[in-house]
Image (spheres, rainbow, N blue to C red):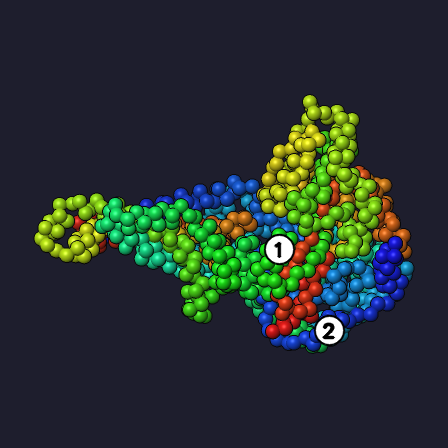
Amino acid sequence: MKHYIAQRLGIGLVTLVGMSVVIFLLLRLAPGNIVDILFSTGGYVNPSERLAIERELGLDKPIWAQYLDWVRQLAVGNLGKSYRYDLPAWEIIAPLIPVTLELAALSLIISVCLGVPTGVISAVRQDTRLDYALRVFSLAGLSMPSFWLGMVIILGLVSWVGWIPPVTYVRPGENLGLNLIQFILPALAVGYRSSALIMRFTRSSLLEVLREDYVRTAWAKGQTGRVVIWRHALKNAILPVVTVIGIEFAFLIGGLVVTETVFNLPGLARFLVQAILWRDYPIVQNLVMIIAIVVIASNLIVDVLYGILDPRVRYGD
Amino acid sequence: MRRLSLVVRALGLVLAASIAGPGIPPTMAQTPKAGGTLHIMLREDLSQGFAIHETSTISTVWPAGPCLSNLVIFDPAKKVESLGTVIGELADKWSWQDNYRNLVFFLRKDVKWHDGKPFTSKDVKSTFDMVREAPDAPVKLRINPRKDWYANVEAVETPDPHTVVFRMKRPQPSLLMMLASGYSPVYAAHVPAASYRTGCVGTGPFKLKEWRKGEFVDYVKNPDYFVKGRPYLDALRYVVIVERGTRTAAIQAGQLDAAFPGETSKTTMEQLKKAVPQMVFHEVAQTVTDNIIMNVKKPPFDNLKVRLAVSYAIDRRGLIQASHQGGAVLGAAMLPRPFGVWGMPEKDLLMLPGYGKPDEMKARARKLLAEAGITPDKPLHVEMATRAIAIYVDMASFVINELKQVGIEATLKQVETAQWHSMATRGEYQIGANLTGLGTDDPDANFYENYACGSPRNYSQYCNEEVMKLFDRQSQELDVKKRLEMVVAIQKRLEEDAARPILAQRLDYFAHWPHVKGLVPHHNIYNFPRMQDVWRDK
């Protein structure tokens, strides 16, 4: 197990290095840089002033030298300075992380609470009216983009009750109740889509397991439906679902752009888009690296969970 | 005619008087109530912090305004801006001397910076030497979009700590207009100019409490504000909401008290009015034009006939209906009446290329194109560049359709904001659909910035020495009536040269809740950010 984790960490590190090169180059391939944006807020361009700012920000150096500077800074835990805000990048990024983590976690809880039971019911009641209804419900979730659903929620609320969740972020420590009110609707919008995916995976995986001999044996032994389904069948059917949950969590960390924007939550994804528009390289590079680390870590956690959920799964020690 | 004489008389009041009085007038009949926090809309985070001198965007001026003060400002209670509505802010009074060659400001003595240091003439000199890039200026701005405003200032002198003299090369009454703009605050000399990108040490009615990046800007009342009894509010919060639909929902739901200047279109106003009948709306001009830029240095637009054909082809009224749903008005380079004072009279406007009956105008366009060798068999193919932002693209799409009707086949090229200004400044385009905002409704600010030879914001690269002389002549004309005639003639000339055909003057339907009092939007989005007279009737 230890060997396996070390191996995965090694692969993760290589992935991160690859990612750093890709994101670094892609950013520089995009037309324009921060200096162009700064001048666009001034409505003109002056070539000599432009050069002076590029020199000040180190953008006049060759690309490889800029990359090495960044990697060198990363190695000592320095994320550099935001071009746009003229402040240390970590000072800008740090407050964004809890917002996205909270939204992703709440969305995941909602999607699991909604997706797993409906998937089980749908599988157990296969081809009944209830199954059809739940499948339509899940298909609707997959078909509706969460940002559209978010906008509909906002517009519906303001039109019908003249209220929307707070548009200024409320920290859990300031007012937990208000914080939950602020997060529950975006989490529902995102969680509904994810729950549809989880429901479909749970259903198909459980249907497969329900046809296994040991399940038939359990029924034959006269065990109750609850024991057969929840203890014997679901425990084995849940492995692919855990994978999906892990992937969904990783996706949510970077994929909440529009939901964060619609509900005005100052999270990582919304900020990432703004930083890209501003060509704020230090912020973009480091945010992407953080998202990549979360994706790698969540995949690793899923793999470790495999072993815990199914003792038959062993890693080559 | 009667209206014209009233305007002229109003303008003359200040020009004729050598000394003008200061003071911020009472803004309302109701007795103002003190206290409370005002929640105000912000459509994006501050782009350069509070460094107004380094930007040309309302996204900086609007939220940074309450922290800072000008020497003079436009009367916050009056929507129309002119020399007659300029009042003192940091300057107690001012005086034109030496036949309008020297502008002397007598500064208030009771002003303190937010960090407790006294405000003196040294701060004024340091600010305007920096902006005009005087050879001995102690600091240099990283980006300096309004250097040209002060091209006529020879020196800024400080005979004593409370007197400042702007010495000019030639008379220029407009200098006062530019100094009254929201773009002309005074920075503290003892604070590095670069620090305004991250914080704000001002003399304004509100002190910066916190700027939480991408979330909000919080201000608290400045207890040492030099106008006694102001501001009325205890605090301000500017809430950053990037998504337009959410912004509208937030004001509708009452989470915001007031909108963002230039944000409320006619359609949004109608939608909000239906949902919240008690909401207050102000129809004001933005002093932002829709216009066409054509590169006069490159074929085919180096040919005046082709440029004029473009101007004739575009139905201004059609654009106002299609792109603005009626939320804009006809006008040339300067803001038309009753929104501004320098606009062309309607009868003159109707004589300009593109302002007449659409069919007749298009026939004129086809004739001009034929004279330039462009016929339906041999259509002209061009690339129409515009910024990849909805308001630009809407306008460009309308224009492309209009041009097609006269035999110009234009394809749309959407240019990212990062590339737009460098492309336009370098003239790396053929024709473009553009928006231009003016910091103040003043002929000097407009003509020198957008039409003068060599100006970096003269995107068309139009350069006419004869017209330049006309700019200079109107600039130093002290007789307001004569100057108005000159300005009208210049506007006519610019349209006839198709230097930058103006398509529409945009309107805003600024929204706020009825409990917000004393907030009077001006016919210029940049010039009412101070909030010192605003109060909550709640």
- Residue under the image location 24 percent in, 50 percent down: A125
Secondary structure of residue under mark 2: loop
Please identify the residue farthest to the top as the structure is shown: B377
Q: Earlier in the sequence, mark 2 or mark 1?
A: 2
User: Is residue B20 positioned above or below B395 on the image?
Assistant: below
Q: Tell which tag, 2 or 1, sits nearer the viewer.
A: 1
Please identify the residue farthest to the left as the structure is shown: A221
Disc 2: host chain: B
- Residue under the image location 63 percent in, 72 percent down: B536
Task: Give the amino acid type for the residue marked by disc 2 in the picture.
Answer: Ala
Q: Is residue B241 visible?
A: no
User: Label 1, on which residue?
Assistant: B270
- Residue under the image location 76 percent in, 31 percent down: B363
Q: Is residue B287 left or right of residue A260?
A: right
Task: Give the amino acid type for the residue marked by disc 1 in the picture.
Answer: Glu
Residue B243 at what x, y percent from top left?
54, 54
Q: Is residue B13 visible?
A: yes
Which one is nearer the viewer's eye here, B281 or A11? B281
User: Label 2, on which residue?
Assistant: B29
- Residue under the image location 65 percent in, 44 percent down: B322
Using the rendered view, name the quadrant where residue B305 is placed.
top right
User: Is residue A54 positioned above or below A89 on the image?
Assistant: above
Disc 1: host chain: B
Residue B45 at what x, y percent from top left?
57, 57
Residue A272's disc number: none
Residue B424 at what x, y percent from top left?
67, 41
Secondary structure of residue under mark 1: helix
Q: Is residue A251 left or right of residue B22?
A: left
Using the rendered view, name the quadrant where residue B165 is placed.
bottom right
